[in-house]
Image (cartoon, rainbow, N blue to C red):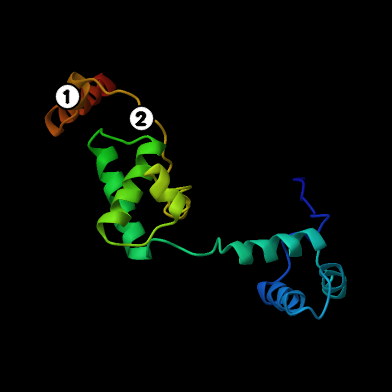
Amino acid sequence: MPRKYIRKTTWGKTPLEEMESAASEVKEGKKSIRAAARERNIDKSSLLRFIKKKKTGEEKRILTDEMEEELAKHLKQLTEQFRGLPPVKCCQLAFEYAERNNISVPANWTKVQSAGRLGFLVCRHLSVRTPEATSLGRATAFNKTTVGEFFDNLAAVMDR
């Protein structure tokens, strides 16, 4: 009989509306963090983290969905052409893309001439790693003709 995991905590199960209302009460000074968390049965550390996140504005996005999609498409195209970029170069490309489209970027981006963490890569299901070198012979040999020949030979061997 397969095992069935039963969750023992309620961390991360609080609805967003509940967190928002608790955070607004704390912000307005009506209640302390501890009191608001206890009243709504929310972990106080989670509530504190949520409030800090809202204060720092981590939810602010630099690039729109269309821009992120275009950038992701370009990164995929580079990979298909055996010219994948390492993570650092992807961040620099995102900064350059924002700069050329006259998008205001955070000061730390301008300082290092590179974007920060690229969260859109996760959303677009992209895994950016330092690419391995592909020899010229291997890249040019991978074409329709040679692949077709390989499968023809494979079929002949399998028939034998």
Instruction: Identify the residue shown where x is 55% and y is 60%.
Output: 58
Determine the secondary structure under disc 2: loop
Query: Residue 152's quadrant in the figure?
Result: top left
Residue 47 placed where, x, y %?
A: 75, 65
Residue 4 placed where, x, y %?
A: 76, 50
Q: According to the image, label 2 marks what residue?
A: 131
**In the drawing, what numbered circle is on residue 141?**
1
Position of 100 with respect to 39 (left or right) is: left
Position of 99 with respect to 126 (left or right) is: left
Residue toward you, 66 or 112 = 112
The C terminus - image quarter: top left
Instruction: Identify the residue shown where x is 84% and y is 72%.
Output: 32
Estimate how packed mark 1 is, as few (under 14), some (14 to 19) or many (20 or more) residues with alpha carbons within 10 Å: few
Query: Residue 139's quadrant in the figure?
Result: top left
Amino acid type for the residue under numbered disc 1: Ala
Amino acid type for the residue under numbered disc 2: Pro
Residue 85 placed where, x, y %?
A: 33, 36
Precedes in sequence: disc 1 or disc 2: 2
Q: Nearer the viewer, mark 1 or mark 2?
A: 2
